[in-house]
Image (cartoon, rainbow, N blue to C red):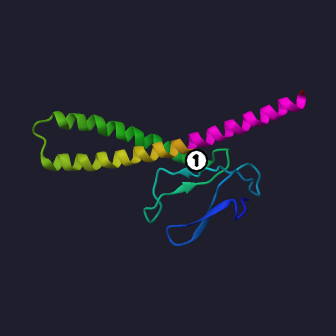
Amino acid sequence: MATLKEAGQHAGPHGQAFRAATERSTPRGGGTVSVHPRLLPWPGLAGQRSYLVTDDNGGILSRLADEMEEVQLAMGAELLDHATEILKDRKAGALEFRFLSTRLCEALRDALRVAESRGGLLADFDDAAAESEERQALDDEVTE
């Protein structure tokens, strides 16, 4: 596991402390833990941001988060189509527009969370690719 020096101390939503690894580390079970905790597409119990720190294998929670993100983006696309129809309807009233605005804000919030989460995943992928290139360069030097 990461040492205390390698980890930053952060307070959780209920005052508990947890460590955020600042570099890849090897947990007891083997494998590597990501330096970029994944932002999950759902809030925690108190409405706080929730993160997943996992190995590179993509476990059950990671797959569930992928599925949830797909649902959120699909719902946002459907809502956008619905908004287009309401905007064309000259008989739509203030209550309909207020409801639509609220749902559009929710969909935009979800889409931004998905973008932030996937941006972190891309950073993780870039880190892994850089490590692989470094290993390959070292292997090439050793074989020469």
User: What is the x, y in percent for residue 97?
Assistant: 18, 46
Is the residue marked by circle 1 packed among few (<14), some (14-19), or many (20+) residues within 10 Å?
some
User: What is the x, y in percent for residue 98?
Assistant: 20, 50
Query: Circle 1 — which element?
Result: helix
Residue 23 sits inside the magenta stretch: no
Q: Which residue is mark 1?
A: 62
Q: Residue 123 sits in which quadrant?
A: top right
User: What is the x, y in percent for residue 87?
Assistant: 18, 36
Residue found at the very far bottom of the displayed protein:
15
At x 44% / y 66%, what residue is drawn?
46
In the image, residue 80 above or below residue 144: below
Disc 1 marks which amino acid?
Answer: Ser
At x 63% / y 45%, what residue is drawn?
58
Residue 133 sits inside the magenta stretch: yes
Range of the magenta residues?
121-143
The image quadrant where one finds the N terminus is bottom right
